[in-house]
Amino acid sequence: MQYYVDGFRGGDPDLKNAAPCRRDRSAFAPLPAEVDVLIAGCGPAGLCLAAQLSHFPEIDVMIVERKPGPMEKGQADGVNTRTMEMFQAFGFGEKVKRESYWVNQTAFWTPDPQNPQHVRRIGRVQDVADDSSEMPHTLINQARIHELFLEVMRKSPARLEPDYGWSVTDVSVDPDSDDHPVTVTLENAGVNAGATATVRANYVVGCDGARSNVRKAIGGALHGDAAHQAWGVMDILANTDFPDIRQKCIVSSASEGNVLILPREGGYLFRMYVELDKLAPDERVASRNLTSAHMIAAANRIMAPYTIDVKEVVWWSVYEIGHRMTDRFDDVPAGEDRNPRVFTAGDACHTHSPKAGQGMNVSMQDTFNLGWKLAHVFQGRADASLLRSYSAERWLEAKRLVETDHKWARIMSAPPGESELDGSDVPRVQKQFVENLEFTGGLAVEYVPSAIVAEPVHQQLATGLGIGRRFHSAPVVRVSDAMQMQLGHAAEADGRWRIYAFAGRADSSAPGSAIHALADWLQSDPASPVVRYTRPGEDIDALIDFRAVFQQTFDQLAYEEMPALLKPVKGRLGLQDYEKVFCTDHKGQGDIFDMRGIDREGGCMVVVRPDQYIAHVLPLGARAELAAFFDGFLLPVAAA
């Protein structure tokens, strides 16, 4: 992490300088009449978006939540590897790694053929495949994740805080207006319960759950089916003779159903998802009056001969599995040609079972996709038509999620007699688990070609960095200080594009080399996207952050010969940035060129979006193609 660029300041380096002209947030201050973006809901999706937008204090953001304060416990707990990569960009990935439980192995238990009323362990599977990500799969209280996002917001230049005790009841859009065309009706759920207020916004994002009023207001409806199966979930402190209680476990009994065990952070707490009763097609789970006692009794029946002695139930809930999604994630009806003003994210537009651990993760990825696009539009860097890509990209991924989770949920609940695929001793659930590892890690997302995802014309130059897929980090050494690190960790959730230039075998960036020529062109040529889209007074990397990776060791490279774009002067004091140049890691962690299939002879450049997805792979000399790509969606400075 870098700081002091605008002068020395003691204290917490995460605490940014406060922006002027911020909203009055004192105890009795009125709500604003107008905002740029109004976010409904302080769940993971809403807070992820608010945290990202708080980096841009010029965007006036309001986030409302019906509850009187932050969540304290319960609900989702699984953080997949893709989300951990995103957390690293927000600056709290290492904190989650320290506090969380790491899911290293998943154990599978099935009925013992010699005694079918008892379960036995039949196998274990490594939970995160080797080199699928540098980050672990973790489990941590959702409330803690909320707190980490809230901390980012509080320390941001905007000093953004939620407005608790308010919920959205209605949204209307004036399609003929460009001046705060969305009217939002809020209802107070606190000390002035029932009171209403009206706020006008340029954009509204509904992160208000499966019963979303924002979705209903724009005519959206969840379509899909239900499994008519009641499940219970509880976080408990308990003693047990079950030997794998500190591993993730899927336990299938002969006649009593299934249990999913998820150890939690802290060494003692664990979560259990317990299969309960079948429901009639027209029956709701609430009618059964199921309690935590029913869950505990069912868990003891399923896990026989092992028992659980519960000392404290920290949180519990009963739910019915459903797989549903909306036809669109914004307010533009099919066939209508206009830019969206209202969006939905997370459970407001797709719901599924919690047992694949995707709900919270996919919800945050929804708004991580949307946040930088909103920022580009507000900053005048891109036309509002860029916002159409949100629904286009995320709807396809939600569809994949719902279909995969639909299949997985039914396999989880399948009777033991249906557990084999091919007559082998490996249960169907274990085989499907292995096949789903990329999906459950959040790593299967692949955006199709568009204005912001290029066709894979030059994909052979970096076969392990697929266009449309997330940037798969790998170890490097930073040349200036010989620091071993992950290349992907150089990128923050700051709305900037990255161009990683991988040097050819003979290139050491001497004047006239391919890297030097590319950097000089980017810095000075009128056709360069850096020149065309960086505004007067901005740092040269304010929008496009150019970095280089060489094949030599750090001591074989002459830092003084590096082009100026790789050692730019920045900030109020004009200080030189020493953190743009990297080389391969020769200390045993792996060679990024080999690990990601990068062409060693000629090298290449990899263009990465602000949400960490790869937009383009190009030869180092493909300047016209690079310029044409950015020209396809960015607005030149003169037109901004």
Image (tube, helix red, strand yellow):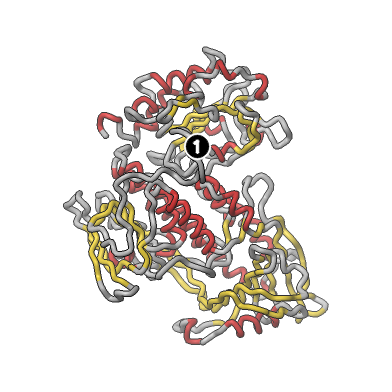
Q: Is residue 601 left or right of residue 321?
A: right
The structure residue drawn at horizontal position 44% and vertical position 36%, both measured from the top left corner, is 497
9 vs 379, nearest the viewer: 9
Q: Is residue 55 left or right of residue 467?
A: left
Can you identify the residue that label 1 sits on?
A: 3
Q: Residue 525: where, in percent of width, then height?
A: 38, 19
Secondary structure beneath label 1: loop
* Residue type indicated by callout 1: Tyr
Q: Residue furthest top?
A: 512
Residue 421 visible, this angle: no
Up/down of 273 relative to 45, above or below: below
Q: Residue furthest left?
A: 176
404 vs 250, nearest the viewer: 250
Looking at the rendered image, the quarter that the N terminus falls into is top right
Residue 219 in which image quadrant: bottom left
Looking at the rendered image, the quarter that the C terminus falls into is top left
Q: Is residue 157 left or right of residue 171?
A: right
Residue 243 in which image quadrant: bottom right
**Number of on-image labels:** 1
Q: Residue 595: where, in percent of width, then height?
A: 65, 36
Q: Residue 286: where, in percent of width, then height?
A: 48, 83
Q: Residue 303: where, in percent of width, then height?
A: 72, 77
Instruction: Please tell me how crowded label 1 is: few (under 14), some (14-19), or many (20+) other residues with Cα within 10 Å.
Output: few
Residue 157 visible, this angle: yes
The structure residue drawn at horizontal position 47% and vertical position 26%, both measured from the top left corner, is 575
Q: Residue furthest front?
A: 10
Up/down of 617 relative to 78, above or below: above
